[in-house]
Image (cartoon, rainbow, N blue to C red):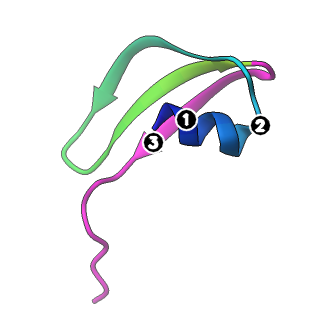
Amino acid sequence: MEKILKTELKTSVLKAFGSSGGGYISKGQGYETDSGRVFVKINHKPQVNA
């Protein structure tokens, strides 16, 4: 995951900070980058089209 984030964010620095948070549907993690802090939200559940 971190390799993909480095590539997509075009950064050489990617350092997790804080603790990852999570809920029933998704979880999140904050990272320090060359350009400042970012928050990444991840949803592993399949999308439902109703």
The residue positioned farthest toward the left in the image shown: 24
What's the mark number on residue 32? none
**Label 3: how many Cα within 10 Å (few below 14, some 14–19, many 20+):** few
Location of mark 1 (residue) = 3
Q: Nearer the viewer, residue 5 or 42?
A: 5
The residue positioned farthest toward the front in the image shown: 3
Of circles 3 and 2, the one toward us is 2
Counting from the top left corner in percent of width and height, residue 47 is at 31, 73
Location of mark 2 (residue) = 10
- The reply, left or right, for residue 24 in relation to residue 47 is left
Label 3 amino acid? Lys
Distance of label 3 from label 2 (alpha carbons): 18 Å
Is 45 covered by the magenta stretch? Answer: yes
User: In this picture, which residue range is highlighted in magenta?
Assistant: 34-50
Distance of label 2 from label 1 (alpha carbons): 10 Å
Counting from the top left corner in percent of width and height, residue 18 is at 43, 10
